[in-house]
């Protein structure tokens, strides 16, 4: 049985959640683009491809892959924070 520390488990779950959050953002962007009178097919394809890639990345993420977990948390976390900051600025 493989064992991991609580710190590893928390980092892993945070990484999975940030991927889920980013996929939700992409789903919203896809919905926004799809609802336009003339949706941009190339943009839709790009957004869908990234959402799919993230699905597979999340499925392949492993607790003991510390480098991947750290990269996901840093890179995708920054993207999610930036997206939220942009939305808050618009709402104000």
Image (cartoon, grey):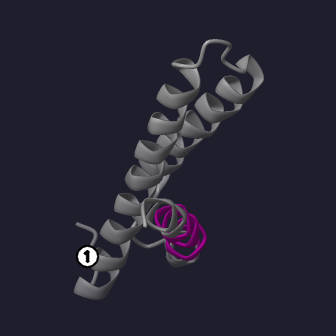
Residue at the right extreme, as displayed: 42
Q: Is residue 32 left or right of residue 10?
A: right
Q: Quadrant of the C terminus?
A: bottom left
The one of 85 and 48 positioned closer to us in this rendering? 85
**Residue 62 falls in which quadrant of the image?**
bottom left
Q: Position of residue 3 (x, y in %)?
A: 26, 76
Q: Residue furthest front?
A: 92
Tell me the magenta residue range: 71-84
Find disc 1 in the rendering and name its residue: 3
Q: Quadrant of the N terminus?
A: bottom left
92 shown above or below 23: below
Give the left or right position of residue 77, taking residue 36 as reference. left
Label 1: few (<14), some or many (≥20) within 10 Å? few
Residue 51, image x, y percentages: 54, 38
86 vs 9, left or right, is right
Q: Regarding mark 1 in the picture, which secondary structure is present there? A: loop
The residue under the point 28% across, 78% down is 10
- Residue sitting at x 23%, y 84%: 6
Q: State the image coordinates of residue 63 (x, y, percent, origin top left).
A: 39, 69
Asked whether 17 or 3 is in front, the reply is 17
């Amino acid at each position: 049985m493989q064992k991991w520390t609580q710190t590893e488990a928390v980092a892993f779950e945070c990484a999975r959640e940030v991927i889920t959050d980013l996929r939700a953002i992409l789903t919203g962007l896809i919905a926004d683009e799809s609802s336009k009178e003339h949706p941009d097919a190339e943009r839709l394809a790009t957004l869908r491809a990234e959402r799919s890639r993230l699905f597979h990345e999340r499925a392949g993420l492993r607790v003991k892959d510390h480098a991947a977990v750290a990269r996901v948390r840093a890179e995708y976390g920054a993207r999610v924070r930036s997206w939220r900051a942009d939305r808050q600025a618009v709402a104000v």
